[in-house]
Amino acid sequence: MIDENYFTYEILKDALVAVGDEMFAAMKRTSMSPIVYEILDFAVGVTDARGNLVAQGNGVVLFMATLDSAVRAVLDKHGPDGIHEGDIFITNDPYGGGGTHVSDVTLVLPVFFEGTLIAFVANKAHWTEVGGMAPGGNLTDSTEVYQEGLMFPTVKLSDRGTINQPLVDMIEANVRIPDMTLGDMWASVAANRVGERRILELVTRYGRDTVTGAMSRILDYGERMVRTELEQMPKGEFFAEAMLDGDGLGNGPFHAQVKVTISGDRFLIDFTGTAPQAPGSINTTRSGMNSFARAVYVACTAPHVPVNGGMFRPLEVICPDGTLFTAIRPAPTSVYWESGNFVIDLVWKAMAPHVPERLPAGGYLTVGSTNIWGTHPDTGEFYLLVEPLAGGWGAGHDRDGDNGQFCQANGETYNIPIEVAETRYGVRVERYTFNTEDGGAGRFRGGKGLVVEYRCLSQAWLTSILGRHDYPPWGMAGGSDGSPNRIMILRNDGTVEEHGKTARMPIAEGEVIRMVTGNGGGYGDPRARPRAAIAADLRDELVTPAYAESIYGYSAEAE
């Protein structure tokens, strides 16, 4: 028998998901930074009054456990007596408040109806500039978190509707491009206001108890859908290990491992045995680890279900304090995704052979953060380019890997369009092509990475980190490993340098920065690849004739 409120709750379930989507659109339209309005490096969401995630707008997958964690940090620190209508909280502490690195800043707004707290809306966005010892915040040579920029320990940006102007003044005084930073902050406020307004409209129309009841049912629905999928999954213990590149300060490589245990009602991820936290900035904190773990858990179980907190009730993540995945203060975390992506990759590697219909071979994995800054040759103004890089994903059991896609953790993000990059920054993008080098052969080949070249039109500096420079993506079922990521500097004197990481590297006028992202791992015996598929790769110039002949035994002339 159908509950008499069933249809109303279904309408509200979709309406609350739509609230997240509208918040997302508002943030995109009102932000100041290309990393927000072009790349979409942010996430928005709605929680209930206890901080349970009800709905999340599309965006960065790695923020999946950070919005509700930020709300709970507000509840824990300020309590029911310290949260009022008109308040806005700001947090980015990597060690509390759902933080990742200080560049990712969360704004939390409580939603009240007739004096009662009924929900929260939250927005987490990557600020292009947060101060610190170098522009852009994505530091590869920091040794403590205090070097990485301003930290906001879950404090009030607005108190009962009155803006905390001294805090705004402090932000303005400590960042290199205050118009952009503050513009993004006010865009976050605007997006949260949109969410608040839409929730209040729903409450006015359907009643407070009906809307809060719908929130509870949404959480139960998420749990029910995941448990249904868990019943279909293989049961037992599954293992994987990996090596991570060094930390940029001469330490490493680092060992990491996982044991995944799936039973009828639980999905347990245990990272015990992973290396201690690094002196350099590749560390992830516990909130970051939980978010990465959520991402791969959803990929394994119910990727088709809109994300909410109820989905994670069967999930448990274990890891001792003080590891690469659970660093403790004051360890630097500026490029936390370099270890955090291995949270995803380890579980992926352990489970891929058992759920091949959902998880392909290893991919290029890195965010590929590229920070280029200098003085614009046309305007004389300071510029700061911050951009992630797409790469090759691994091949699946029934298809080739995806070409030129962003890593699992980045989710629904994009590159900066070439026209925008060349207008806003002092670079010329001279090459943007697929990576045709060796790697990733198989019955189904790995997806192709990219080759991106920036020619600097004036003196510039580069900070960048591309993990999997030393350890390429893994193949499956006889498929070949993919190719490594790398940074290449084409100097004016004709020399070429290769790096996996750079820190404030000077780039002279006219020199070229070439970013190369790897090809994903292959799946299956390369000799079993269909001849038509090899011919198509040759036609599209995704492989060379020599590679096709040596790896696949295919000769266009012989055919």
Image (cartoon, rainbow, N blue to C red):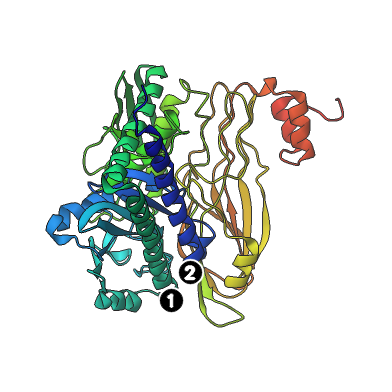
Location of the N terminus by quadrant is: top left
**Marks 2 and 1, how far apart in space?**
8 Å
Label 2 amino acid?
Met
Circle number at residue 179: 1
User: Which residue does the image show at 77% across and 27% down from the upper left?
Assistant: 532
Query: In the picture shown, does residue 234 fall above or below 217?
Result: above
Q: Nearer the viewer, residue 162 or 271?
A: 162
The residue where tag 2 is placed is: 32
Q: Nearer the viewer, residue 43 or 492?
A: 43
Looking at the rendering, which quadrant does residue 346 occupy? Answer: top left
**CB-based contact (under 8 Å), mark 2 and mark 1:** yes
Query: Counting other residues with Cα less than 10 Å from the Cα at mark 2, is it few (<14), some (14-19), or many (20 or more)?
Result: many
Looking at the rendering, which quadrant does residue 538 occupy? Answer: top right
Q: Nearer the viewer, residue 48 or 388?
A: 48
- Horizontally, residue 109 falls left or right of residue 435, namely left
Query: Counting other residues with Cα less than 10 Å from the Cα at mark 1, is it few (<14), some (14-19), or many (20 or more)?
Result: few
Query: In the picture shown, does residue 461 fall above or below 139?
Result: below
